[in-house]
Every structure is written in C-alpha cells, then in structure tokens.
Image (spheres, coloured by chain):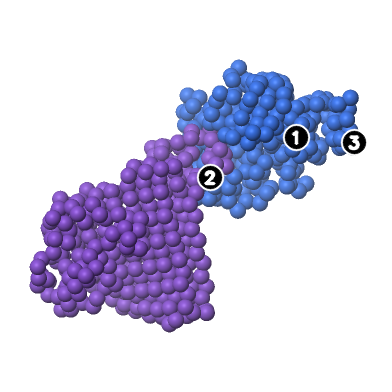
Chain colours: A blue, B purple
Amino acid sequence: MLKIENLHATVDGKEILRGLSLELPPGEVHAIMGPNGSGKSTLSYVLAGREGYEVTEGSVTFAGENLLEMDPEERAALGVFLAFQYPVAIPGVSNLQFLRTSLNSIRKANGEDELNAAQFMKLAREKAKLVELKAELMKRAVNHGFSGGEKKRNEIFQMAMLEPKLAILDETDSGLDIDALKIVSQGVNALRGSDRSMLVITHYQRLLDHIVPDVVHVLMDGRIVRTGDKDLALRLEDEGYEQVRAEARA
Amino acid sequence: MSLLETLPAAPKSEPPALKGLRAEAHERLASEGLPTKKTEAWRFTSVASLIGADLQPGPSTLAFELPEGVRRVERETLEALPAGPFADLNAALTDELVVLRAEGRPDEPLSFRYTGADHASYPRVRLEVARGAELTLVERFAGEGAFTDAVLEIVLEDGARLKHVRMQQERGQLIGLVSVTQGRDSHYGAHVITLGGALQRLDLKVGLDAPGASCDLRGFYAVDGTEHCDHHVRVDHRAPHGTSHQTFRGIADGKGVAVFDSQAIVHRSGGHAEAHQENRNLLLSETAGVHTKPHLEIDHDEVVASHGATVGALDDDALFYLRSRGIPVDLARGILIHAFAHEPLADLPEAFEDEVYQGLLERLPASEALGGLNEELA
C-alpha cells in the first residue's frame, strides 16, 4: 500500500507539490491526470527519489517503510519502479547487461541468489514477448538509437523483468502512435496483479481506454482536486481541465 | 645536481649512429635548457622538481622480445627527429640505440617492456616497418621508476601497417616521445592507455608525409589522487589524401590533473585531407583538473575537418536512471565510466582487450561487480 500524506515538494526553490494526498491499495491501478505544469512528473521523481526534488512537508510510506529516507536503489529493491517519460540513452552499455546488473542488484539486496547468464537469458526472452521487443534491440546499447515507441516498450520490458510491487508510469503514452500504444498497454495489462499497484500518470484520456484504471485522480496546482472512477477521465476529455478547476474552487 | 648537470662535458661517442644528433642536442640543451612553466608546451605540466632532482643516468630499462619477422639491425647514421627538450636529453644520454626492422606479416606482436629503476633511464628505439609489412607493437610501462625518458621513432614505409598499443601504467615519472613518419598509403593505428602515475607525459607526433597515408589515434587516460598525465598530439598532413582521426577520452578524479593538447596541421602540400579531433573528459571531483586544447590549422581549401572538446561531470540523468533500477550508486558510476571508455578503446587488438580492460576496471568504483559486464549474453 502506498500512502502519500500532505506532500509538499520544491524544485529549484519553487513549490510544485502543495499538499498532495493519495492512497493506493495493493492490486489497484490509479490514474493521475493533470494539465502541464500540475506536478505530475515531479510526483513521479519524488516517489523514485531523484536528487534535486526537495520534500518540505508531508510523508510517503510504502510497504510500511518511509520511502523518503531511502536512496533510489533502495526503493527499487523494495519494489518501486518508475517507467520514465523520457528513458535515458546510455551508449556503451548493452541493454541486457544493464538489465542483468539491475535484476541481480535487486535480488542481492533482497537476499536472493543472483541469476547466471543462462537463467537470465531464459527470463529475458520470455518477458520480451510481452511487448514484442526484438532480440536485436535487447542487445543494443540502452535506449541508444531507439525510436520513441521502442524506448517505451523497453521500459515495460524492464518492468516485466523486475516485477515491481509499485509501478509508476510517467506519461508512458506520450509520443506513441496508436499501434505502439496498444502494444505497451497490453504489456502493462499483462502485468496487473493482486500484489502489484500501479500509478498511471497521463495528460490524455486516450491511454485509459487501454489501461482501465480503478480510480482516477485529477492533479492541479500540486494537489489532488478530484477523485472518481474511470468516467471522470471521460468527463475531463469532454469538458477540459478548466471546468474541473472551477468546480474545485467552488 | 640537476638533470642537465648529468650531461657529459663532451658528447658521448657511443653509439656512433647518434653522433650527429648528439652534437645538435647538446647545443640546443645548452642554449634553451629544459622547459619551465613559461614554455608553452609545458604550461600545465611542471617538471621543475624532476629537473632539479639528483637522477644519475643508468642502463636502459627496456626489455624486448622479437617475434619471427622482426630483426635487429645496425644503422650508421640517423636523420634528426622532431626536436624536443627531453628527446634531446635522451639523445645526449642514452647508452644504447635499438634499431629494429619488421618485414612481412609477423604473427606475433613485437613486445617492449619498460620496468623503471632507481636511476634515470633513456631507452631509445627506432622501428622500421618495411614496405607492405604488417605488425602489431605492444609497449608496457609498468614499475615505479625514478625517471624514464623514452624515445620511439617509427618509420612506416610505403603500404606498411602498424597497430600500436601503448599501456602507460608507470607509477613513477615517465616522459615519452613517439615520432611516426608515414610512407605512401601506410596506416598507423594507436591505442594509448594511460592509467595514473606521478607524471606521465607523451608527445605523439605523426607525419603523413606521403600521399594516401592514414592514422587513427585513440587514447584513454585516468588520473586520481595527485596523479598527472599529459598528452600532446600532433599530426602533420604534408602530402595529399591523408586521413587522420584522433579520439581521446579521459577521467580526472581526486586532485588528479589531465592535460590534452592536440594539433592537426594541414599544410599547403596536404590537400584533399580529412582530419578529425575529439577529446572528451569526465571531471569526477571538484579538485581534479582538466586542460584540453584541440586545434586545427588548415592551409589548404580541400579539407574535411572537425574538432571538439568537452569537459563535464557524469550524466545525472543516466546515473539516476541506473539507480532507479536498483543499481547501487558506486556500481552505477562505474558502469557509466566504463561505457565512456568504450569508444576510444574500440578496435583494440583482441589479444590485449582483457589486459587493458582489467587495468581500467581496477581503477573504477565497484570494480568487482563491473567485471561481469564483459560476459557475453546471447
């Protein structure tokens, strides 16, 4: 269970999150929708532990632990996974070597045996099918020379390999055409499960046709202003964020 | 006693092939002396304490193995090398001139090992690669020598090809000159790997002196603690249709200082040239220093050229990406530095890959865990 209470966070001295509260029970998929600048990406970075995002007030607990006191790698070992809006290219590091190092680091942190090359490759081939990732892409340098869609598929491939307990999908739909969106969504849906929570962050309702959320939150000006079911997303699409903003003020 | 005071009053007579060079060297040293901070090419590399030290010349510490196809020959006279203060010092003080000649395609590499000693050592080699011959030369500098002043002259005859791997892992003080003269359509490929050392300075000078000659110069250097390294590279395009590539990268940590100075000069006689220079540096601590200065001089219209230099920290985005995937920060840093070294080490002769990467890994954070990165996954 992820529990965020009254979260305030600043970036470069500017307050972006202003009292955000949210509860995400195990097995549920929550969408967070919001206009540009509402704090969506800041929330995902704060949860993943990026430096430069200062929490000034509030708390975040996950699986009974105070997430805010942990390094990014410790959070990953606890089961937190962020699918990046802009996955980073790392020339000179093969995608597979990177992922094996990642998986084994997490296993080691949890006191599990590391996978040898053969065990790892068996798992990788199996999971790559979920997002139809070509063998050739798995071997290339991490995200280097990947198209937008390939990068996003690679994120979901990593998620499938690492089997997180909390997956945060930061605008995973941005830059995808409808075919790529379907493939990515299928991959995400296949990973839904009773012991996995997902926070799907998006600007557009379109993604939620494919990844149907249990709950929809509307994030504006750094806090949640509305919470509802999937129909709230459809309303937003029709009426726009301004209507919701006006109602929230009323 | 200082280095200059170790010069004999009159030029030494042995070996006789150096006679002409010696007289000139003595003269230049007498009039110009050894470099100071005011000498442009030595601005960032102080040799004051080295020059002032009591370092008596002793036997050369070079040991070499000749594969089949390389033999030792005698030369009566030698032409002058590009002058330099330490090359002059070497000419004046060396006790042995080694002239080697490679022919055909030796299967095994020619191997030089410099061990360093308590005294000053002045090894001097001239390597001739005969017309159409192909050779691999590997040099290893390892030890903790008081001072090694090594001069290597390479002559590539028409159509000759040389792969040169130079591993500079001297922990003491090393100053070296590699001077290459290239014949028609010859190719010179160098990998210089400089890891640490109190002082390691290399002047690498390549002359594309006949049409169609090409060189590909790659290097990787790393300094930490109070280590200091300095690479001065110069390529002269003196004949048409020459191609030169320079790809050097380095990392500076602790209070280490790395200097990179590179010139590519396309002379009026060197048209239809292609000259590329790239130098990238990672600055891993606030107290480390990097001085980089690649420059191009072009005296001809028909030239394709590029040059660039960067000095920066590790990429924060990439570091966070790796950490967000559960990779501990030290290992993540190691992975990124390892990746950074990848390009200049590309095309390294396979036989030396393990050795070079092992030397490199030992200097990276979380080196033990990094070892697995080279394992094949298929």
Please report whichever mark, 1 or 3, sits nearer to the chain's N-terminal start.
Answer: 1
- Image location (x, y in percent) of residue A82: 63, 34
Tags 1 and 3 touching, CB below 8 Å: no
Label 2, label 3: how far apart the Cα atoms are: 41 Å
Name the disc covering residue A38, or none. Answer: 1
- Of residues A177 and B75, the one nearer the viewer is B75
Same chain for mark 1 and mark 2? The answer is no
Question: Could you tell me the amino acid type at mark 3?
Answer: Glu
Question: Could you tell me the amino acid type at mark 2?
Answer: Asp
Residue at the spot x=19%, y=72% of the render?
B27
Residue at the spot x=30%, y=54% of the render?
B46
Quarter of the rendering containing residue B104: bottom left
Same chain for mark 2 and mark 3? The answer is no
Q: Is residue B372 visible?
A: no
- Mark 3 lies on a secondary structure that is helix
- Of residues A96 and B280, the one nearer the viewer is B280
Q: Is residue B39 visible?
A: yes
Q: Give the chain of mark 1.
A: A
Residue at the spot x=48%, y=67% of the render?
B276
Seen as rendered, the residue at the extreme bottom is B269
Choose mark 1 or mark 3, whichever is in front: 1
Question: Could you tell me the amino acid type at mark 1?
Answer: Ser
Quarter of the rendering containing residue B207: bottom left
Name the disc covering residue B315, or none. Answer: 2
- Image location (x, y in percent) of residue A132: 66, 45
Name the disc covering residue A239, or none. Answer: 3
